[in-house]
Amino acid sequence: MIRIAAVGDVHVDKDVLGRFRPALEQLPDRADALLVAGDLTRHGTVDEARCFATEFGGLGVPVVVVLGNHDHQSDQQAQVTEVLTESGITVLEGDATVLEIRGQRLGIVGVKGFGGGFAGACASNFGEREMKDFVGTTEAIADRLAAALQSVRADALVALTHYAPVPETLVGEPLEIYAFLGCYQLGRAIDSAPTSLALHGHAHHGSERGRTPGGVPVRNVAHPVIKQAYNVYQLLSDQVDLELVAS
């Protein structure tokens, strides 16, 4: 059994320091790794990245993250990544990490993702150059996710994104903004490999549970959705589906 703690959209700055830490310090007894699904900071500054590293670093379990749109706001994403990496936090963007947990291999593949929408209401790679560039960005990111997922050999495989791969976990958000919250290409990429679980954030008013067309469980772990410091899910258990085992 592998236990994964997950949260997203924590938006850490100096005013948030200490809010999550008491619960996070219990993680070694509750989970084998912590995954954070983007929007680590409020405005994507180096100072805020240091605040996140202080709050979420040194927990006694591996911490793996992707960046979100807020983490790109100040165009300092390279510096933010450097601060996090130097603090021992793994930042993924189109690549993978594999954790050895009690003789089992947990593969984690991460990308930020991008918008574009879902079947019947999505942007298409046609028309103006600006639209082609928008959809091209979405497709390139999804292709990187698919390639990385397909390259990993693990007992359990998790896809970590900020943007949503399915519309079901967006229910509660206005339909008009679905195209800015996720895209079907991410779901297609997740289904291209034997993915065990997909985690995302971004949709603060969305729903927690969904599935890809191929049947992969999807969980929206945005902090405003789960309303606690993290959820813990177990993989490779005797359960048919994911089980929420701690919070």
Image: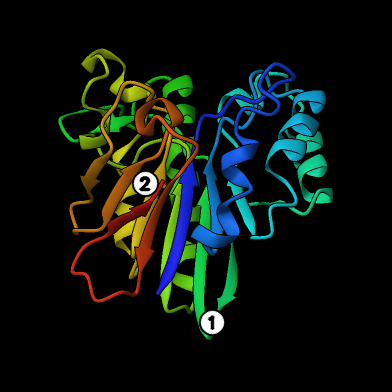
Q: What residue sits right under mark 2 in the picture? A: 186
Judge the density around disc 2: few (<14), some (14-19), many (≥20) Cα neighbours within 10 Å. Answer: many
Relative to 221, does residue 43 appear above or below in the rendering?
above
The image quarter in which residue 149 lies: bottom left
Q: Amino acid at mark 1?
A: Arg
Judge the density around disc 1: few (<14), some (14-19), many (≥20) Cα neighbours within 10 Å. Answer: few
**Nearest to the observer: residue 79 or residue 189:** 79
- SS for tag 1? loop
**Nearest to the observer: residue 51 or residue 246:** 246
Q: Nearer the viewer, mark 2 or mark 1?
A: 1
Residue occupying the far bottom of the picture: 103
Model colouring: rainbow
Q: Position of residue 1 (x, y in %)?
A: 40, 75
Dot 2 or dot 1: first in sequence order is 1
Q: Position of residue 17 (x, y in %)?
A: 71, 26
At x 47% / y 78%, what residue is drawn? 154
Q: Which mark is residue 102?
A: 1
CA distance separating discs 2 and 1:
30 Å
Q: Amino acid at mark 2?
A: Leu
Relative to 141, does residue 117 appear above or below in the rendering?
above
Q: Which mark is residue 163?
A: none
Is residue 146 among what the camera can see? Answer: no
At x 42% / y 79%, what residue is drawn? 155
The image quarter in which residue 88 lies: bottom right
Q: Position of residue 89 (x, y in %)?
A: 71, 51
- SS for tag 2? helix
**Nearest to the observer: residue 15 or residue 39:** 15
At x 38% / y 23%, what residue is drawn? 204
Query: If the image is split into quadrants, where does the C terminus sit?
Result: top left
